[in-house]
Amino acid sequence: MRVALSIPALVLGAGLALAHSGASGVVKERMDAMKAMGDSLKAVKAMVDGAAAYDAAKVAATAKAIAAEAVAMPDHFPHGTDHAPSEALPAVWTEHEAFRSAAGDLGAAAEILLAASDDPSAARDALGDVARACKACHDDFRQDK
Ligand code: HEC
């Protein structure tokens, strides 16, 4: 029997459809990068749920892209970019070490997904951890919707 994979609704939910008009520069870039991660996670979720054919190469590519984005993420949040339409909380800057560490947790989870990409069942578990790493950071560093 398959156990339903729970991906936090905050990460993959309808909020994704709400694009932010008016964002520009690095704020728009990081929003776009976040959205791209959300879209690729959805594609992998469809595969591990059996709704789409499992493509190990695609899962590996997604995991690599997310790991790379996790490394780059702190640079996408320069000082002075906490104004609307950004939804970043001031804690991104006041608790910068914790923010970096949350990005590091995502990177670590993405590496585990990469290592598991040949095994759909292991990838399924790893994907859940990736999504939890997204949500953990959003809980602390992103405004509630
Ligand atoms: C280290 C912290 C952190 C991690 C990890 C993280 N995010 Fe984010 N995310 C943020 C912050 C902060 C914002 C708000 C950015 C802004 O509005 O300036 C955000 C915004 C978003 C948005 C909204 C983008 C928009 O258009 O407003 C989406 C979607 C998103 N993240 C998806 C993800 C996904 C999927 C993952 C995991 C693969 C992830 N995030 C991992 C911190 C993080």
Image: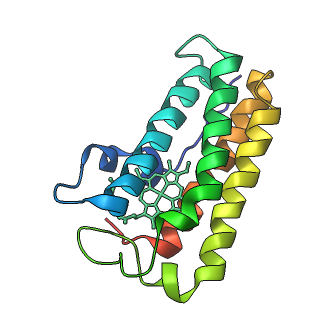
Q: Residue at x 24, y 73 (%)?
A: 84
- The picture quadrant where one finds residue 7 is top right
Say if 49 sits above or below 91 in the image: above
Q: Position of residue 122 (x, y in %)?
A: 79, 31
Say left or right for 56 vs 65. Answer: right
Residue nearest the viewer, comparing 25 with 55? 25
Q: Is residue 99 left or right of residue 91?
A: right
Looking at this view, name the residue that lies furthest to the front.
Answer: 25
Residue 60: x %, y % from top left: 70, 28
Which quarter of the picture shows residue 105?
bottom right
Residue in the image at 31% along x and 50% along y: 15
- The one of 97 and 18 positioned closer to us in this rendering: 97
Whether residue 9 is visible, yes or no, is: no
Residue 94 position within the rendered picture, expressed as x and y whole percent measured from the top left: 52, 89
45 vs 85, left or right, is right
Q: State the image quarter where residue 54 is shown.
A: top right
